Amino acid sequence: EVQLVESGGGLVQPGGSLRLSCVASGFTFSDPFMDWVRQAPGKGLEWVGRIRTKPHSYITDYAASVKGRFSISRDDSRNSLYLQMDSLKTEDTAVYYCARNWNHALDYWGQGTLVTVSS
Amino acid sequence: EIVLTQSPGTLSLSPGERATLSCRASQSLAGSYLMWYQQKPGQAPRLVIFGDSSRGPGIPDRFSGSGSGTDFTLNIYRLEPEDFAVYYCQQYGGSTGTTFGQGTKVEIK
């Protein structure tokens, strides 16, 4: 059974940093690209970014709203995906989901972790 | 950036009826790059349709996707109580990024 479990969310002040983790099980983690998607309270889904696989040089892509502030990485030996968030803004408040990217479709999602940016 | 516009914003239907949801892209998409997701309150999204109108894991055959170019449709035949949710379309833009539509809520009439 495919499982994705996020952690690391919490309350952080504007300008602060936070690192989210996503641990995967039930599939060969090194095979697929992995994405992060967020959802602000009461709003729709917003794509955050993506990391490719080792054969694709672990290349990352980001939404314009987070580029230069957020960084995605992965540790295939630990079946783990990470989202480093710096210079956080109040508008970054959201539930953050990790998702498996299988042939461009996000076919499995974690349960999400809430990040609140507030003073 | 490709913008996806979904319509209607809300669809009020009764169980057993057919739901037709629309997703229009600001630029032509490659056919395999438009997906549909279902989201219920307090839950993560769930993949409904991907690729060449294939269904996601555990999705019943009353869900059907179609379309090409800039116009795509999700049909839900014979709505069941568990189908009432918000549906999002999504396009895969490669290195230029992925975007989602704003969502269509399918509610019980």
Image (tube, grey):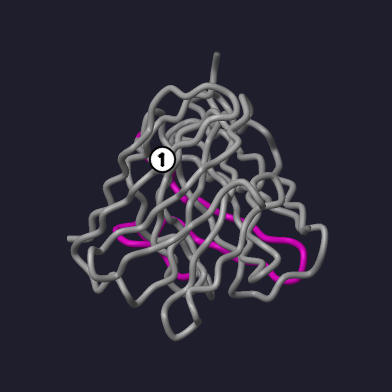
User: Is A15 placed above or below B50 here?
Assistant: above
Please, what secondary structure does the residue beneath circle 1 have?
A: helix
- Assess whether residue B67 is covered by the magenta stretch: yes
Relative to A70, say whether B58 is above or below.
Answer: below
Tell me the residue at 43%/63% (across/down). Answer: A34
Residue at 70% across, 71% down: B68
Q: Nearer the viewer, residue A97 or B50?
A: A97
The location of residue B102, given as percent across then percent down, is 66, 40
* A24 versus A8 height, above or below: below
Q: Residue furthest top?
A: A119
Q: Mark 1 highlights which residue?
A: B83
Image quadrant where residue A119 sits: top right
Report the residue at 50% width, 61% height from top.
B64
Horizontally, residue B102 falls left or right of residue A24, namely right
The image shows residue B85 at horizontal and vertical percentages of 46, 35
In the displayed structure image, the side of residue A41 where residue A21 appears, left or right: left
Region in magenta: B54-81
Read off the chain for label 1. B
- Badge 1 crowding class, 10 Å Cα cut-off, few under 14, some 14 to 19, many 20 or more, is some
Q: Position of residue A32 (x, y in %)?
A: 39, 73
Between A25 and B46, the one lying in front of the other is A25
